[in-house]
Structures are given as structure tokens and as C-alpha cells.
Image: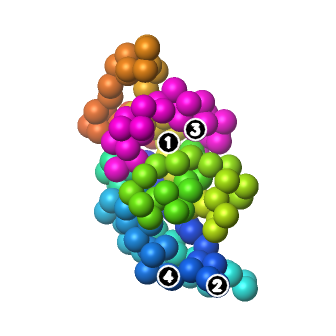
Amino acid sequence: MSEFKLIAEAEIRPTEDEEKVEQALRNVLMEVSIEKVQKGDKVYMVAKSDKPESLLVIHAKLRESAILEAARSYLKKFSSDNKVIMYLNKQAAFMGKISLCTPERESSLGPIKIEVECSNPESLIDWLTPHTRRGHPVREYGLDWLKKSLKSEKQ
């Protein structure tokens, strides 16, 4: 398995402007390649990256929103041995905001699904959403720490 592989997808519904769906992805992800993909009778914008830096915007916006502890619980709920999955409200992402949601219910135009496959999901969760005390991170982990954690777990 590679150290880090991100795939984000957002369905382009018939009433949506595909450029706005692409912009929603670009507003929350950095350093990604984006392409339009047909899957059956649905069309998606799909973003891909092999760099943890692609999550820097989400990392920053989670702190701005002061929802680290809730986001931490959310990510743990949607993680497994080698994956972390999150769903973002597409309209909020278009406006440059982070709003975690459930797979379908809370985003009327469908969510952005971000799936990260990595060698150490626990480190990724610690980096994105560290433990907090009174709403402030107890300890912040840097991007270099995350990269080392992903490499060391791979060996």
C-alpha cells in the first residue's frame, strides 16, 4: 500500500454546474488532479492526490470552525484499518466552508466523499483533529510529523 492516497468525488447532479462542483473540490483540497468521470448513469468530479498536503485546507478550516473534538469523533466513526472517510456538504465547500455530513441526508445535492487510504489512519486523525481541552488542541502535530508517521508505519 502506498503511504497516502486520497480520492474525493462529488456527483454532478443534472441541475448543477460542473464548474461549481469542481470549484467546491478545489476550495477544500490542495494539490489535486481533477477529472470528470462517468460511472453508470451518473457523472462525478473526481480529485486525486498522493500528498498529505492536499488536506491542509481542511486541517486549517477545522480549527477555524472550532469543531475539532466533534470532527475527531466523526473521523473515528468513519475510519478503518487503512482508511479514513469523510463526507463534506458540497454547498458549504463551494462557499469555502467545512461542514461534515452523513453520506446522503444532510447535503441535498449529494456530499463530497473524501476517502484517504494510508498506512496509519490514527496518525492522520491525530494530525487533522488532535485531542482538545476546553476547545483548544492539547498538542498540535505538524505535517512533517504526519509524513514520518505514515512512513514509519509502512515499514
Q: Earlier in the sequence, mark 1 or mark 4?
A: 4
**Which residue position is annotated with label 4?**
18
Residue 127 locus on image (x, y percent)? 40, 33
Q: Nearer the viewer, mark 2 or mark 1?
A: 2
Q: Nearer the viewer, residue 128 or 83?
A: 128
Label 2 and label 3: CA atoms lie apart by 30 Å
Residue 43 locus on image (x, y percent)? 62, 82
Q: Nearer the viewer, residue 153 or 103?
A: 103
The residue at the point 55 percent across, 67 percent down is 9
Label 2 and label 1: CA atoms lie apart by 37 Å
Image height of 69 relative to 50, above or below: above
SS class, disc 2: loop
Image height of 50 relative to 135, above or below: below
Q: Earlier in the sequence, mark 2 or mark 1?
A: 2
Whether the magenta-drawn stretch holds residue 74 is answered as: yes
Residue 153 locus on image (x, y percent)? 45, 35
Q: Nearer the viewer, mark 2 or mark 3?
A: 2
In the rendered image, which quarter contains the C terminus?
top left
Quadrant assignment, res 80: top right
**Which residue position is annotated with label 3?**
75
Whether the magenta-drawn stretch holds residue 22 is answered as: no
Label 2 and label 4: CA atoms lie apart by 9 Å
Please tell me the numbered disc located at residue 119.
1
Amino acid type, mark 2: Pro
Q: Nearer the viewer, mark 1 or mark 4?
A: 4
Label 1 and label 3: CA atoms lie apart by 16 Å
Q: Earlier in the sequence, mark 4 or mark 3?
A: 4
Q: Nearer the viewer, mark 4 or mark 3?
A: 4
Label 1 and label 4: CA atoms lie apart by 33 Å
The residue at the point 32 percent across, 28 percent down is 141
Query: Magenta segment range?
Result: 57-83
